Amino acid sequence: MINYSDNEPNYKGQSNDDPVYVIDEIDIRLPCQYFEIQFQERKSVYFNVAIEFLLRLLNTLGELSEIHVSQFFAYSFEDTTYVISEAKNCGYIGRNDGKLYLTPAGKSHFDNKDEPIIKEVSEKKELTFCIDLISYCSAKKEWISDFDNELSSIEIGTKDQKEKESLVIDSFQKNFSEFLEEIGYSDEEIRKTELFTVYDINPGRTGECLIPVKIELSDQLTTVLPSIIDWKSGNELQQRLSIKTEVDKHILNLMIEENMEEVAPSFIASKRYLLKCAPQLLDSYFSLSTEIDVLSYVKKAFRENQLFCSEVKTIITFGTLWTQRNTDIMTSAIESSNLDNRDENVIVWLRPETKHWGKSRQFYNLYNKIFGRKNKNLSYFISPYSHDICDSLGNKKIRLHEKTMTEIPPSNFEMLFVPGKFFAANLYLKLPNINNYPISVGLISIDRKYLENACEVTRDILKNYCQETKETEFLYDELQFKTYF
């Protein structure tokens, strides 16, 4: 079952009701197009005070004589005559048998309100708007980087230009206030402005914007909850239900590969490596021959301390490393290990074989936090793919591959290793009964004894599963634990 969460989760992934665990954060590209729209708007402006209160008086009490009007406002005869003449010349009031009354034109200015408003039509405007090509609502203009181009994109059907233009006009009329907000109108300006008419529409270049999606699991890990509430909520989300449906389909398409079955050789190899990183800690949760109790592991990790200190040197985790929760833990590890003051040591990141790994700006931000001030000549990704999202980051890449029929790469295993500082290790697996969406469980550690294990694991992967190149040999020799202490 795959549903959307109607409750806004807190930053840890909890809703206001049952706990919800954030296991991934991805960004999806939404196709857009720019349209130049010619239109006129109508704004509410107010009367001068004297005429306004004359109209209010007649709207409340009905017909009144000029004498009663003069007495009510304590005006002189000349002032009363002037105000009445101004209102009559505008067609707002009439006179019958010496009594004043509101004309239909005068009544129309109240528009079911107690305060009379004048609607003034503006000059013709010609503005360009970014509009998504699924719901045809306004979209935020975004600069798409080389990294963003590697993110997944929602597929759209084909429509001819006339059909597009008709959908844009319908949306422009229906959601005019939202379009005004997109071009910088204040709340007060939006409240006073309405669309008068649309004259013309001209299509322009195509573009894209990003939809941030949080992948959440329900309390018993039985329901996937793709939430886009951080992007749009309330009425704005209701206007984009077609986008919500397409995001739902996109998440369903992120299916697990066969080698994520717990009996697959690659999974067994991956599980062995995770256990080797911290056997004293992980033995209490699972062994090589037993299944992982993911529910217990996730609930325990959810309650874990999120900051490193002298007493806390290892934290068990669930979900990708770039969820907000894990990013906070990684930040604490960076600060605790004085990573910003490091020497020019190597950094290695082994990625797992999952389709959507790293497809998030959160991943990019985490990458910059770790690699940003680092000499990229000493930073390496180990990847099973000849081309993937790592290629857009500028680091060196080493291919993970199957050397022989008996040496199956640990494609479910992830290792981010900063020698002498910290490491993060994850095992990706599937959960039963929830549409095969992968979840990762693992740990982040600054503990010296576990760092030594992580170093041995990384070297073993380089030796047994990576292409034999000068870079691989250099990295294998460089990753000697004793070098960093």
Image (cartoon, helix red, strand yellow):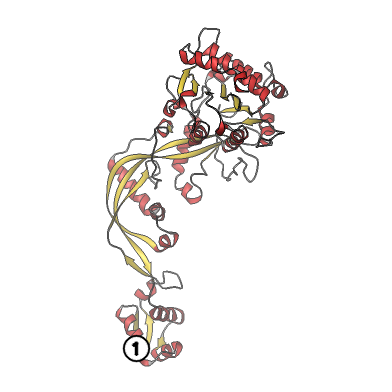
Q: Residue at x 54, y 17 (%)?
A: 478
Task: Residue at 44%, 40% (x, y): give it.
Answer: 243
Q: Is residue 229 above or below residue 322?
A: below
Report whether 259 appears left or right of 148.
right
Q: Is residue 159 above or below residue 120?
A: above
| Residue 37: x %, y % from top left | 30, 51
Quadrant containing the N terminus is top right
Q: Is residue 430 visible?
A: no
Q: Which residue is mark 1?
A: 81
Category of crowding for the residue at label 1, using alpha-carbon neighbours closer than 10 angstroms: few (below 14), some (14–19), many (at least 20) = few
Q: Between 339 and 155, which is closer to the camera in this rendering?
A: 339
What is the number of callouts on the image? 1
Question: Which of the pair 37/342 is nearer the observer?
Answer: 342
Q: Position of residue 236 (x, y in %)?
A: 46, 49
**At 49% across and 20% down in the image, what residue appears?**
383
- Image quarter where the C terminus lies is top right
Determine whether, in the image, residue 130 is placed left or right of residue 404: left
Asked whether residue 46 appears in the rendered view, the answer is yes
* Image spot of residue 435 (x, y percent): 55, 28
x and y, in percent, of residue 200 in the image: 26, 52
Residue placed most toward the observer, 145 or 218: 145
Q: Identify the amino acid type marked 1.
A: Thr
SS type, badge 1:
helix
